[in-house]
Amino acid sequence: PADNQKFSLQEVLDTFKLCLSENKEVYLEQYVAGWRGLVKFLNSLGSVFGFISKDAVSKLQILVNYMNGENASHYATVQSMVKYELDNNLVDVNKKESHPESGCRTLLRLHRALRWLELFLDRLRTSTEDSKTSALCAEAYNESLAQHHPWMIRKAAGMAFLVLPGRQTFFEVMNVGPPEQVVAKLGEALPLISEVYQITEDLYAQHNLLDLP
Ligand code: 1PZ
């Protein structure tokens, strides 16, 4: 159907809800599905964001290839992926060598972007009618992802932020109804995203994976 490409915050919320197993493992399939929803949203904002969504899509594809590959069973959760790749020396730890596209390093890029999302959505949630989405977005970016990006990317990102739609349009694209409802939905979504982020962050910290090249 035509609205296949249409973003709904509810849908993303649902997939992030399904991300966590009973014992708090992160299912890769739902994680990737959650990101797919976000990419849809990004695409609906315009082609200026193409360079960002392209990178996200190519990283999702790397993960999907592992999930569908011969070692698929090890790529059920982030926890099983980390264990499998580390146990089998499939991760370049200090510099890019024979495994430049490990699942661990690929997911780390998305994980860092999830922190940006958390900060940005929280700013949107607590923003007022006259808030500028570009400023909210830039603040969230500078506090998170920017610290991992070289100058050129930071510049390009900063320029893309400038053409973000205003708060009202932004809320409309989320497809959840009037602003009060968007704010409520964001309040619902944030703890879920935060929990997935924190569990991944703790796992990566525990295994010393937070600086993978
Ligand atoms: C709603 C506005 C969207 C703003 C998104 C904010 C993020 C800006 C990120 C700009 C980076 C795009 C170019 C690619 C950079 C890559 O070099 C890095 C590192 O990967 P490596 O080179 O090491 O393989 N890629 C990333 O940091 C992953 C970025 C994913 C961004 C996904 C954003 C999804 C937005 C959802 C919108 C609701």
Image (cartoon, grey):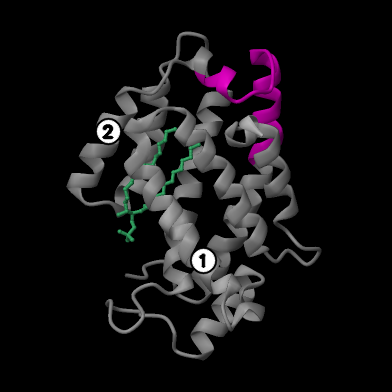
Residue 180 belongs to the span the image colors magenta: yes
Query: Most extreme residue toward the front, as rendered?
Result: 1
Q: Which residue is mark 1?
A: 63
Q: Which residue is mark 2?
A: 158
Q: Secondary structure at mark 2?
A: helix
Looking at this view, is 204 or 66 the one in front? 66
Can residue 91 be seen here? The reply is yes
Can residue 144 be seen here? The reply is no
Q: Residues within 10 Å of mark 1 (few under 14, many from 20)?
A: many
Q: Position of residue 32 (x, y in %)?
A: 58, 56
Amino acid beneath label 2? Gly
**Residue 100 placement: quadrant:** bottom left
Give the CA distance from mark 1 to mark 2.
Answer: 28 Å
At x 60%, y 25%, the residue is 174
Q: Nearer the viewer, mark 1 or mark 2?
A: 1
**Residue 92 placement: quadrant:** bottom left
- 134 up-or-down from 179: above or below: below
Q: How many marks?
A: 2
Amino acid beneath label 1? Leu
Q: Over which residues does the magenta segment extend?
A: 170-190
